Amino acid sequence: MRKAVLLLVLITFCVAKLPGYNVDIQETSVSGLSAGAFMAAQFQVAFSSTIKSSTIVAGGPPNCAEGNLSTALTNCMNIPTSINVNTLVTKSKNQSTSKSIDPISNLQGKKVFLYSGSKDTVVKQGVVKATQKFFELLGANVSTKYDIASEHSYVTPSNGKACSFLGTPYINHCDYDTARVSLETAYGTINDAVPAVSANLIKFSQDSYVSSGMSMNSNGYVYVPTSCKNGAKCRLHVSFHGCQQTLEDIGTQYVTLTGLNEYAESNNIIVLYPQAKKSQLMPSNPNGCFDWWGYTDTLPTSLKYATKEGKQMKAIFQMITDLASGSKAEAQ
């Protein structure tokens, strides 16, 4: 009981703004589950000058929804044959030409890992295979894992529900280490996991990064390994939760149970966990998803959600920039 109280005290300590660490911003990678995977995919494409690698767990290609919720819920989750990948590639190339995203040529050789459980009933495996085709057409170095009989979830070696379970917290144990594979996709062979340090999980205010109408929580979380706190050169990983994985839904389970923090501690990797929130009106986001269909855009004729000017995209990139603001390389 005493340990539980201490942990609660430690992780509820809140800083007003993200401090800067000795982070090489070019060593930033992203990952996400479901809506978070769609977000990770569009973040990789929009900020390809910075983002080194991405892991997409049960997510589709950028711009799939075309700003339409109905399309998002049908084509982009359940009807993969309706996804025109060539059209989406052309869309990204046009965005690159208009400079609303970074040069699309940056994706050449970028490492992308895709995971889809063979028993996923929420985002069909064919959707993830469309994402595979999208990145391959743009020259990315894509690896995949499609043969585990998992339901819709972030898969771990031991944390969460049974592998075939569908439901909260959408973290299932299937004797597979998604966290390790994600980080090794970005950084090569890494050290084994060690226990996470509770004092290193920091709650921070997102209020200075976001505004009303963005469906973002007032607070986010960041795990900062002891070595990074002490000035060591570190890398940065951003992990996007899925729908119904907000702090309102599952507390800090997504922040603490994926296994990322344990690898972060032993490998000098800071992990940023931005937090969306539920919103019933203006915008309509009742499940607390990150924006991959355009709910933050006020004009349907001018969709920015998947670009560098997308409200959530811009806010989270600023979080990354602030975390890397203590880079000794930049200071020289």
Image (cartoon, helix red, strand yellow):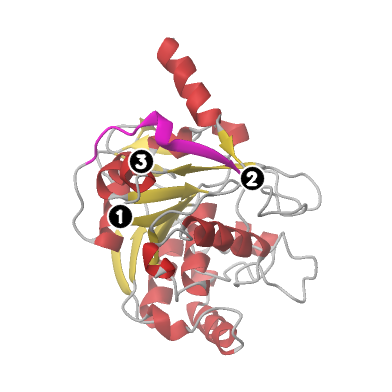
Asked if the residue at tag 3 contacts the one at tag 2, i.e. Cβ–Cβ closer than 8 Å, the answer is: no
**Label 3: which residue?**
261
Residue at 53% in and 63% down: 79
In the picture, residue 263 is in which quadrant? top left
Sort mark 3 into few (<14), some (14-19) or many (20+) by Cα contacts within 10 Å. many
For the point 67% across and 63% down, which residue is it? Answer: 311
Residue wearing tag 2: 288
Q: In which quarter of the image is residue 246?
A: top right
Which is nearer the eye, 92 or 331?
331
What is the spatial separation of the Cα atoms under label 2 and label 3, in whole angstroms?
A: 23 Å
Left or right of 204? Residue 182 is left
Answer few, some or many: residues within 10 Å of disc 2's Cα (few below 14, many 20 plus, some between 14 and 19).
many
The magenta span reads: 193-205
- Pick whichever of labels 2 and 3 is earlier in the sequence: 3
| Numbered tag placed on residue 183 in the rendering | 1
Q: Which of marks 2 and 1 is nearer the N terminus?
A: 1
- Comparing labels 2 and 3, the label whose residue is closer to the camera: 3
**Residue 190 seen from this side:** yes
Residue drawn where x is 68% and y is 68% of the image = 67
- Marks counted in the figure total 3
Is residue 19 positioned above or below 253 on the image?
Answer: below
**Label 3 sits on what residue type?**
Asn
| Amino acid beneath label 1 | Leu
Q: Which residue lies furthest to the front in this view?
A: 332
Q: In this view, does 321 lie to the left or right of 57?
A: right
Residue flagged by tag 2: what amino acid is it?
Gly
Is residue 148 visible in the rendered image? The answer is no
Distance in Å between CA atoms under marks 1 and 3? 11 Å
**Mark 3: secondary structure:** helix
**Residue furthest out toward the bottom:** 97
